[in-house]
C-alpha cells in the first residue's frame, strides 16, 4: 500500500548548520507531497507542499523538491535556527499518509 | 482566529470507561478528520468525514466511533477505553481542492488521552 518513510530522529544540529531530512514515498499514482511541522505543545501546521513532479515547495527558508524518479521529497534548509526545533512530518495524498516524524533539535 | 478547537486537552480514563472527544472548526470546511499520534508511528487516520452527513473508516478505526454532528463539529467516541488507546488525538479539517488532494489540512492542538 501507499506509505511514507522518513529518516529516523532525533537530529541535533548547531545553529546555522545545513539541514536535510530524507523522505521517500510509495504510491500507486503521483500524489501531492507535503511537509508539516509540529512545534512543542501544538498541532501540526503546513510548512510546504508540491503537487507534481519537479515542483519545488518553499517556505521560511525550507525547500523540498518532488522527485518522481527517486520517489523522494527531502526537506532542506541552508542555515537552521534554534526556533526551527520541532518535529517534521512528511506526508502524501489527500487524507494524508504521514511518515513517522523526525525530531529536530537546534543548539545555540 | 479559532481555527480547529478540540476538547478536552487532557483526559485520564480507566480501562472500560467511555468518553467523547469534541472537535469544532470555524473555517466552513467540508472535510474533517481524526488522527492519533503515537511515538515512532507518525499520525494514523482513525476516521474521516468528507462532507456533512458522511463518515468513513481510516487506517485504525477499531474501538472508535464518530459523529459528524453538523458541518462544524466532528466528535470521536471511545465506548470502552483500553490502554492501547493511550495516545494524542488530533482533529483536522480541510476544504476540497483543485486538483484533488492538494489542499492543506488544518489541525487542532491535540487531546492527550491516558488509559490506565
Image (spheres, rainbow, N blue to C red):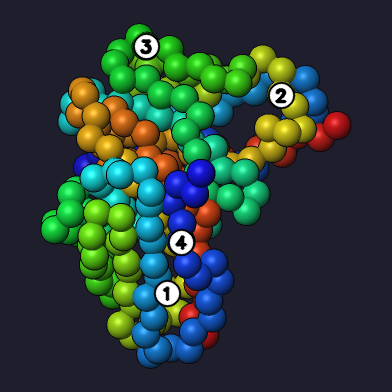
Whole-percent x, y for residue B98 in the image: 21, 24
Q: CA distance from mark 3 to mark 4?
A: 34 Å
The foreground one among B50 and A99 is B50
Circle 4 residue: B6
Circle 1 residue: B84
Q: CA distance from mark 2 to mark 3?
A: 23 Å
Mark 4, secondary structure of its residue: strand
Circle 3 residue: A55
Mark 3, secondary structure of its residue: loop
Do the CB atoms of the residues marked 2 and 4 lie less than 8 Å apart? Answer: no
Q: Nearer the viewer, mark 1 or mark 2?
A: 2
- Chain at tag 3: A
Q: CA distance from mark 1 to mark 4?
A: 21 Å
Whole-percent x, y for residue B110 in the image: 50, 58
Do the CB atoms of the residues marked 3 and 4 lie less than 8 Å apart? Answer: no
Which of the 4 quarters of the picture holds residue B19?
bottom left
At x 24%, y 65%, the residue is: B69
Q: Nearer the viewer, mark 2 or mark 4?
A: 4
Circle 2 residue: A80
Mark 1, secondary structure of its residue: helix
Mark earlier in primary sequence (2, 3): 3
Amino acid at each position: 500500500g501507499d506509505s511514507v518513510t522518513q529518516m529516523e530522529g532525533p537530529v541535533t544540529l548547531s545553529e546555522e548548520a545545513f539541514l536535510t531530512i530524507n523522505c521517500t514515498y510509495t504510491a500507486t499514482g503521483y500524489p501531492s507531497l507535503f511537509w508539516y511541522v509540529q512545534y512543542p505543545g501544538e498541532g501540526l501546521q503546513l510548512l510546504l507542499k508540491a503537487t507534481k513532479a519537479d515542483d519545488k515547495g518553499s517556505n521560511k527558508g525550507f525547500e523540498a523538491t518532488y522527485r518522481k524518479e527517486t520517489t523522494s521529497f527531502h526537506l532542506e534548509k541552508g542555515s537552521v535556527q534554534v526556533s526551527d526545533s520541532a518535529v517534521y512530518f512528511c506526508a502524501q495524498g489527500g487524507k494524508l499518509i504521514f511518515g513517522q516524524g523526525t525530531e529536530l533539535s537546534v543548539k545555540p | 482566529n479559532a481555527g480547529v478547537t478540540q476538547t478536552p486537552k487532557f483526559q485520564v480514563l480507566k480501562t472500560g470507561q467511555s468518553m467523547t472527544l469534541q472537535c469544532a472548526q470555524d473555517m466552513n470546511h467540508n472535510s474533517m478528520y481524526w488522527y492519533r499520534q503515537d511515538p515512532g508511528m507518525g499520525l494514523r487516520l482513525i476516521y474521516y468525514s468528507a462532507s456533512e452527513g458522511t463518515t468513513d473508516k481510516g487506517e485504525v478505526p477499531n474501538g472508535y466511533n464518530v459523529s459528524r454532528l453538523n458541518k462544524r463539529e466532528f466528535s470521536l467516541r471511545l465506548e470502552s477505553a483500553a490502554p492501547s488507546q493511550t495516545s494524542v488525538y488530533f482533529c483536522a479539517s480541510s476544504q476540497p481542492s483543485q486538483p484533488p488532494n492538494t489542499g492543506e489540512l488544518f489541525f487542532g492542538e491535540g487531546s492527550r488521552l491516558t488509559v490506565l
